[in-house]
Amino acid sequence: MASLEGVRVLIVEDDWLQASELAWQFSDLGAEVIGPATSVEAGMKLAPTADMAILDINICGEAVFPIADSLHERGAPIVFYSAYSNIRIPERFHFASRLNKPASVARVRHVARSALDELNVPENDVVRVLPRLRLTAMMLMEGPEAADRLVEAVLVQAIQTGQPSGEDVESWLTRLLVAVAEVRGKELLT
């Protein structure tokens, strides 16, 4: 497993044993462990300094989604780590990794590394822009299926026309998204 030297990993976990195990795993890889935080309030205070986070979904009966929102706004990868496989994660976190407890050390490390690799995707890369593009589509369309069809139509058009020089990927794709929604919006609803 590659080193995580210098990566600041926020751990939000209310079980002391689990938190200690996670902290050890990431320290062993060279990461700088932030926390572990044992409450949502403590996690919120630490979130601005994190490069990525391992979040138990249920912390003392409180959902960690405000912490995840804070991290997502900054583009920090999130791994939800929970014993409750039936907890519904809000659609806005569809991109986040999820691990069910218990997970092996190797599995936790692999999922965390995969999530962190997203940081190495250039800011102007289509893969990095897709979650925001999909959120915009969901605001324009009725339902996630129609939004996904809109994003698909935009990507097909983008491939066919190519990116204009001087325009960043996100602005270009968002402009295309609005244009396609205006022209084909009703068609994409069904």
Image (cartoon, grey):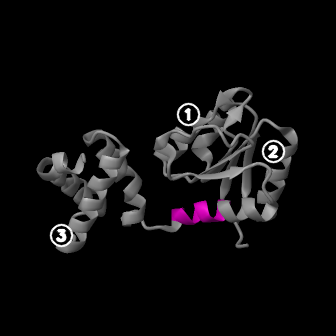
Measured along the vertical axis of the image, is residue 36 above or below residue 164? above
Instruction: Determine whether the residue tagged by mark 3 lies in a helix, strand or loop.
Output: loop
Look at 24% across and 60% down and name the residue there. Answer: 154
Instruction: Determine whether the residue tagged by mark 1 lies in a helix, strand or loop.
Output: helix
Q: What residue type is labelled 3?
A: Pro
| Circles 2 and 3 in contact, beta carbons < 8 Å | no
| Circles 3 and 1 in contact, beta carbons < 8 Å | no
In the rendered image, the residue lying farthest to the left is: 183
Instruction: Determine whether the residue tagged by mark 2 lies in a helix, strand or loop.
Output: helix
Residue linked to disc 3: 164
* Residue 134 shown left or right of residue 177 in the figure: right
The residues bearing labels 2 and 3 have C-alpha atoms spaced at a distance of 48 Å
Query: What's drawn in magenta, residue-wise?
Result: 112-119
The x, y position of residue 20, in whole percent, is 85, 47
Depth order, front residue of 85/180: 85
Look at 59% across and 60% down and name the residue there. Answer: 115
Q: Which of marks 3 and 1 is nearer the N terminus?
A: 1
* Residue 93 shown left or right of residue 53 in the figure: left
The x, y position of residue 18, in whole percent, is 83, 45
Q: Which of marks 2 and 1 is nearer the N terminus?
A: 2
Residue linked to disc 2: 19
Measured along the vertical axis of the image, is residue 62 above or below residue 7? above
The x, y position of residue 177, in whole percent, is 22, 53
The x, y position of residue 81, in whole percent, is 70, 47
> Crowding at label 1, few (<14), some or many (≥20) Cα neighbours within 10 Å?
few
Residue linked to disc 1: 66
Q: Earlier in the sequence, mark 2 or mark 3?
A: 2
Quarter of the rendering containing residue 84: top right
Question: Which secondary structure type mostly characterizes the magenta part of the structure?
Answer: helix
